[in-house]
Image (spheres, grey):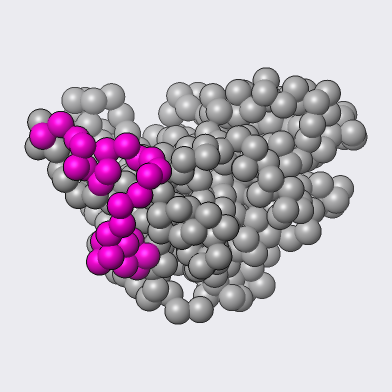
Amino acid sequence: MDQSQAPVLEALAAFHANPMTGFTPPGHRQGRGTDPRVLQALGAEVFRSDVLATGGLDDRTSSRGILEHAQELMAEAVGADHTFFSTCGSSLSVKAAMLSVAGPHEELLVGRDVHKSVVAGLILAGIRPIWVEPQWDPDLHLAHPPSADSVRAVFEQHPDARGALVTSPTPYGACADLAAITEVCHDRGLPLIVDEAWGAHLPFHPDLPRWAMDVGADVCVTSVHKMGSALEQSSVFHLQGDRIDPAVLSQREDLLGTTSPSVLVYAALDGWRRQMVQHGRELYDRTRCSSPRSSAGTSTGWTACTSTAGRTSAGRDAPPTSTRSRSSSASRRSARPATAPATGCAPTTRSTCTCATTAGSAPSSATPTTTPPPGSCSTP
């Protein structure tokens, strides 16, 4: 497919070139009915581009396939079988994924560190959560994702569970050993859902941790408004394999989603995908973790710490590790090494990483005795 295309943006440009007088929402009529004071604050282009997806950019039957084409381009860009856009954030996406795996009174393994939207999905669907404890780091005072061994042990106690859901990366930047957790699920013929809301950037640079589609996870939910440049409420969820029917996943999204999706959000998602395919590696080369790591010794509020692969903390499982090699989307999953642990920010067995400390505290020259979470490098 031609990844230089942006079907939603192109359709929007065509709409602007041939404006229509419609008798449909939105009632502001591309800003003509908007209070000038609102236009002054928000900008006229926001309202000019706020049109219907169907009955506007496309007809009511979506015969031009504009949105479908944009989703297919996104799927190809990241190596997924199917991709769905959500204009209601990942809160909708994760609920749709959960409803595709389990139903009322059925069990689903769920990491105890999940987002509020997952809890809402449990309540909405009547799914019974079987909690899997995360790995507490007493030195950094934060939780890493559950280990594969923990997931396996809970499955043995609940053999009727329909699948599992884990969060990776966490809001702190810690990444799970998704390859091992996926293997645990697939050995039982069960799907794995990954709430990867904070990992939109992961497919687009080889030095970033492995992400869900790379290791064979079944559904991955991503918030592009978090680690991408799309608008608020921009989310995508990816599907691969045959453990979840794509038609079922699409129906669950349609059940929960709005009938008035925002073309602004669709357009931002479409444009971000094109940007990442064309320029993502270059952009992340300039912003990846080497920058804060190199200045950690002089920046107030940051401290440099050293990590060692496989190290344990206070008798708990070691924080999860990640491998770093990445191939093209077409061959990415088969090209990954099965076991090649690395830590922190660089593909070495011992590396330096930046870890947030109390705001305003002085940098420490001492080496902590704990392992910082892989992928946790971030800019202040």
* Residue 129 pos. (x, y %): 74, 24
Residue at position x 41%, y 58% in the image: 57
Q: Is residue 39 visible?
A: yes
Q: Is residue 229 visible?
A: no
Q: Which residues are magenta?
A: 9-36
**What secondary structure is the magenta-colored segment mainly?**
loop
Magenta segment includes 15: yes
> In percent of the image, x 19 and y 42: which residue is there?
32
Please tell me which residue lies in front, 340 or 59: 59
**Quarter assignment of residue 280:** bottom left
Report the residue that reaches farthest toward the right.
159
Q: Which percent across, then down, holds residue 333?
A: 64, 68
Q: Nearer the viewer, residue 264 or 293?
A: 264
Horizontal side, residue 12 vs residue 103: left or right: left
Q: On the rendered image, what quadrant is the C terminus found in?
A: top left
**Is residue 354 left or right of 69 when viewed as pictured?**
left
Q: Position of residue 117 (x, y in %)?
A: 55, 28
Find residue 144 and report its horizontal and vertical position in percent. Answer: 54, 34
The residue drawn where x is 74% and y is 60% is 241
**Residue 82: quarter of image:** bottom right
The answer to whether residue 251 is above or below residue 160 is below
In the picture provided, is 112 more to the left or to the right than 20?
Answer: right
